[in-house]
Image (cartoon, rainbow, N blue to C red):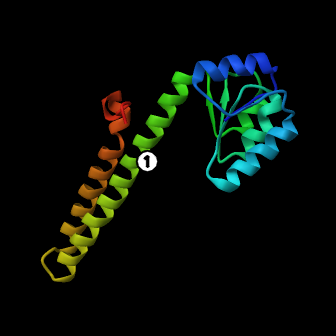
Amino acid sequence: MLVSGDRESEVAYLARFLGIQNTLSSQTPEQKVAIVREETAKSPTLFMGDGINDAPALATATVGIAFGQESAVTAEAAGAVIMESSLVKVDELIHISAAMRRIILQSTIGGMLLSVIAMGFAACGYISPVSGALIQQAIDILAITNALRLTWSTVAVDFDN
């Protein structure tokens, strides 16, 4: 859905360019908030805006993304700020976020699982307290190293999925 405070002709042009069917133009900030609340009641929402008049809707949406650095108010209301006004950057942000979530879950669940297994061995007397501490440190290093994969290169982010 494309909701904008701009004129109908500008909104229609952008909607055609992006392939969006449902558009609303000449919307006030209050109308935008009402639309976001209505849509958020149905499912999680992502609202993108670039002006002060978008700040209330950015704060109301499940996720708010502010474009550019035009307003500190807009940046404060949003969950994320993209310095360039580019939809390509939004796509990158979404893919990086998904990859981060996946890696965080891997690190957390993997680390906990390995720790529980080590505790089982320790409870059965196969691991001494000092060895257990060293094993726990190794598990922590593995989890942290896995979490750092996104900082090493963009290869960890699969932009095709």
The reply, left or right, for residue 10 in relation to residue 99 is: right
Residue at 44%, 42% (x, y): give it: 98
Residue 70 lies in what quarter of the image? top right
Residue 111 lies in what quarter of the image? bottom left
| Callout 1 crowding tier (Cα within 10 Å): few <14, some 14–19, many ≥20 | few
Which kind of residue does numbered mark 1 sit on? Arg
Q: How many numbered callouts?
A: 1
Q: Is residue 137 above or below residue 101?
A: below
Q: Nearer the viewer, residue 127 or 32?
A: 32
Q: Can see residue 84?
A: no
Q: Can see residue 145?
A: yes
Give coordinates of residue 116: x percent, y percent: 27, 71
State the SS at label 1. Answer: helix
Residue at 12%, 77% (x, y): give it: 126
The reply, left or right, for residue 27 in relation to residue 110 is: right
Give coordinates of residue 156: x percent, y percent: 32, 34
Residue at 75%, 50% (x, y): give it: 37
Name the outermost residue toward the left: 126
The quarter of the image holding the C terminus is top left
Give coordinates of residue 67: x percent, y percent: 66, 25
Residue 120 lies in what quarter of the image? bottom left
Q: Which residue is mark 1?
A: 101
Residue at 30%, 44% (x, y): give it: 145
Name the outermost residue toward the bottom: 124
